[in-house]
Amino acid sequence: MSAPDYPYLTATLGEAAERLPPELAQPLDAAFAAVDVPDPITLQGCLQRIRNGDGADGQPWRGPTLTPGQDMAMARAVRAAAGLSTLLEIFHAAERVRVDGGDEQQIGDGTREGLLLACRGLAEYVELQLHAA
């Protein structure tokens, strides 16, 4: 089977694209070819977008206009700050349970210490990223 004369139009219309006059099919196929189709949601695509510096909301960083390196540092700082807030909420809830909850609800000293160390590490990382920007 040979390649269609108008691949983008054929992908849209199927075999009906071959029945269109060339003066109509050619500009339509060119228009379809010019459309910027977003990457499909794949693991590899998501990892690449994450590496390219998306913000805490998963969307590309849209902060003030900075250099590409500063954009990436700010995106990393925003993501780390969002993670820090989440860890602190969990740590706060664990502390409330430690004080007011029953023994069966306790998370243990090791886990509490791990949450505290994770918060400290993320706070230090945020500071480093803000100084890099």
Image: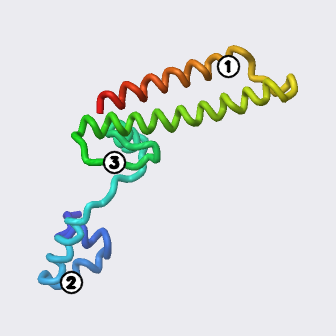
Q: Which mark is residue 39?
A: none
* Amino acid carrying mark 1 in the image: Thr
Position of 77 compared to 17: left or right? Answer: right
Q: Which quarter of the picture shows residue 56?
A: top left
Q: CA distance from mark 3 to mark 1?
A: 35 Å
Q: Which residue carries the number 1 mark?
A: 111
Residue 33 percent coordinates (x, y):
21, 65
Residue 73 percent coordinates (x, y):
33, 34
- For numbered disc 2, what is the local secondary structure? loop
Residue positioned 34% across, 53% down in the render = 39
Compared with residue 97, is residue 82 higher up or lower down, i.e. above or below? below
> Earlier along the polypeptide chain: callout 2 or callout 3?
2
> Earlier along the polypeptide chain: callout 1 or callout 2?
2
Q: Which residue carries the number 3 mark?
A: 63
* Amino acid carrying mark 2 in the image: Leu
Nearer the observer, 83 or 131: 131
